[in-house]
Amino acid sequence: MAQIIPIPALRDNYIWLVREGGNAAVVDPGDAAPVQAYLDRAGLTLTAIVITHHHWDHVNGIAGLLARFPIPVYGPARESIPGRTHPLAEGDTIAVPGVGLELSVLDVPGHTAAQLAYVGTNNGQSITFTGDTLFACGCGRLFEGTPAQMVTSLSKLAALPGDTQVYCGHEYTLANLHFALAVEPGNVALTERLAREQGKRGRGLPTLPSAMADERATNPFLRAGEPAVFAAAQAHAGRRLADAVEAFATLREWKNGFT
Ligand SMILES: [Zn+2]
């Protein structure tokens, strides 16, 4: 059974380190230094790098790590990933070398044009690495994709089992929860979640991973079709919205300007 450990990096990124015995694989190393430091401290050998998308804060550590460890780099086939040895797309599966983890690949475009998410099982527990597609109580900005693409991508993730542990790329949870409460102030699950996550941050702990059931109950971007969320989006837009995709697009724009 592998341990999955958050390595805080850059401003608010998490690099996920999958540790099994004396080996480790990392997901989205945006910076090599904190990974090197962890490997040295724990006496681990790096055996693989897994990438969700091409943004600098997810890939800038690849070259530094490859200089020390000549290892496979898995990443989206249709994005430019430095050092990538294994181009992937939906339907592919990978056995991550050295750490006993098998992952299947989902195409989740929206934040970037060809972002991937990885889904697997660790110690009987369903897990997913979602990059900047699904965040705890939020989702990534639409830099390269359309609202319709992102809604489809998020729906694939939301369909995973409720106990699936969600490992995403950033610690944005508290800001996301404040936005979610502005959208859906009557959602008791949200109020409870805010208290819970504030407690973790108060103790200096990551809020991640989150559980998919909590995302379905509280994440407004998975709930655009729920009557209360749809009504809030419509009120914010000041016009009738045709469907959940329009409601999602309204929520995404609302969040972009929300402080
Ligand atoms: Zn990104």
Image (cartoon, grey):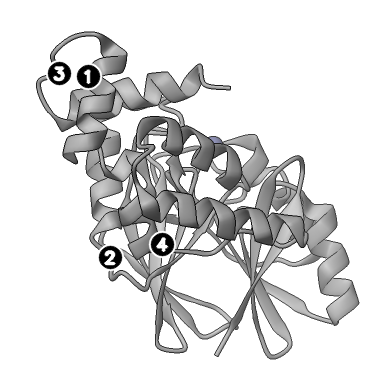
Secondary structure at badge 1 equals helix
Work out which quarter of the rendered image holds the C terminus and state it. Answer: top right
Secondary structure at badge 4 equals strand
What amino acid is found at the position of numbered circle 4 in the picture? Tyr
Q: Which numbered disc, 2 or 1, marks the residue that appears first in the sequence?
A: 2
Disc 2 vs disc 1: which is toward the camera? 1
- For the residues marked 2 and 1, what is the alpha-carbon distance in whole angstroms? 28 Å
Q: Is mark 1 within 8 Å of ligand 1?
A: no
Q: Identify residue for label 1.
A: 234
- For the residues marked 4 and 2, what is the alpha-carbon distance in whole angstroms? 12 Å
Q: Is mark 2 within 8 Å of ligand 1?
A: no
What amino acid is found at the position of numbered circle 1 in the picture? Gln
Residue 107, placed above or below residue 164: above
Mark 4 Cα-neighbour bin, 10 Å: few <14, some 14–19, many ≥20 = many
What amino acid is found at the position of numbered circle 3 in the picture? Leu
Q: Which numbered disc, 3 or 2, marks the residue that appears first in the sequence?
A: 2
Say the numbered circle drawn on residue 241.
3
Circles 1, 3 touching at the beta carbon (< 8 Å): yes
Q: Identify residue for label 4.
A: 118
Q: Can you see residue 54?
A: no
What residue sits 88% from the left and 65% below the top?
Answer: 37
**Looking at the image, how many numbered discs can be counted on the residues?**
4
Disc 1 vs disc 3: which is toward the camera? 1
Mark 2 Cα-neighbour bin, 10 Å: few <14, some 14–19, many ≥20 = some
Q: Identify residue for label 2.
A: 160
What residue sits 48% from the left and 33% below the top?
Answer: 179
Pick the front one: 132 or 218: 218
What amino acid is found at the position of numbered circle 2 in the picture? Leu
